[in-house]
Amino acid sequence: MKLQRLDLSANLSLAYEDTGQGPKTIVFIHGLGSDRHCWQKNCTTLQQYYRCIALDLPGYGDSSKADYPYSMSFYAQCIAALIERLELGTVVLAGHSMGAQIAIHLTLKRPQLVERLVLIAPAGFELFSPQEKSWFAQLYRPDLLQMVPVDQFVRNMEQNFYDLGPDTQPMRDERLRLYRSEDYSRYTKMISANIMSMLQEPVFDQLSQLHLPVLILFGERDRMIPNPLLHPQWTTLQIAEAGQQQISQSQLFMVPLAGHFVQWEQAFTVNEYLKAFLKN
């Protein structure tokens, strides 16, 4: 897939890959600390049936990096601008983790741009108290993130996966490259802003306002949701069902042998769910 760029303003450029064609266009939104490559296994297959656009959010991958707000609303505005500038009409939004919370924000604010919604291990279903939000604010300060030793950094990354097979190595290597790069200071500030924005721009109480078909996929072995430190008494299924019950036109599937990166670890299963969902 050829990398393309779209200038949204003088200092804001989105990098994306655009491949395939078909009756529907899927816009893929990656999650925290990731980039467009996390959708590679999905786009490679789904491009046979649909137009697939996988983008790097501002601050990530090959998109521009500057002093942006890095909030859910900011990202939603950027993706809405991409949809309009590329004249995509109504699209299917597919978001992973933080990307799913961004997709929900965009759908709530600009429902005319979205015909269907795919939420994979979505952030925003798990609720946090004011005290827990304060805990996040202290733990994920940029200065503390920059002090995380490399072995802890590696373990944090590995938590995303159920099975650390060889095909996860490129994603883990890229995260390590960032850790060791001169860009890491900026990166930690962005990550901190992302996390605080997810907490400060919650979506759970607005899920009932989603009046469109929604597919929800969680890995049965997700070790990120629920938060293992704050909510060890909850299960991934409980979080998934709590959110799904708020959305009238939703369907939920728990994917076996998958952690938080469901679409990577069980790409075939996820692709089959997406094809079935988009046929209806």
Image (cartoon, grey):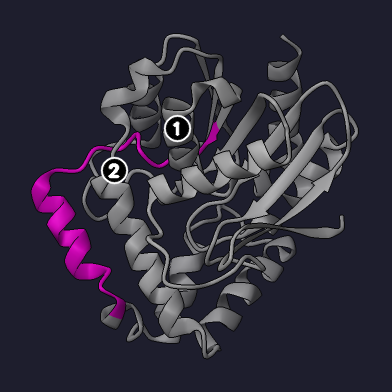
Checking the image for residue 201, the label placed there is 2
Q: Is residue 129 magenta?
A: yes
Residue 258 visible in the shown view: no
**Residue for badge 1:** 104
Foreground residue, 63 or 205?
63
Q: Earlier in the sequence, mark 2 or mark 1?
A: 1
Amino acid type, residue under disc 2 in the picture: Glu
Q: Give the range drawn in magenta.
A: 119-142
- Within the image, what quadrant is residue 155 found in? bottom left
Label 2 SS:
loop
Above or below: residue 144 compared with residue 7:
below
The percent coordinates of residue 198 (x first, y second) are: 33, 48
- Within the image, what quadrant is residue 69 found in? bottom left
| Residue found at x 27% / y 68% | 140
The percent coordinates of residue 241 (x first, y second) are: 38, 22
| Residue found at x 79% / y 58% | 4
Above or below: residue 189 compared with residue 209:
below
Left or right of residue 165, residue 116 in this image: left
Foreground residue, 275 or 192?
192
Residue 172 visible in the shown view: yes
Quadrant where the C terminus lies?
Answer: top right
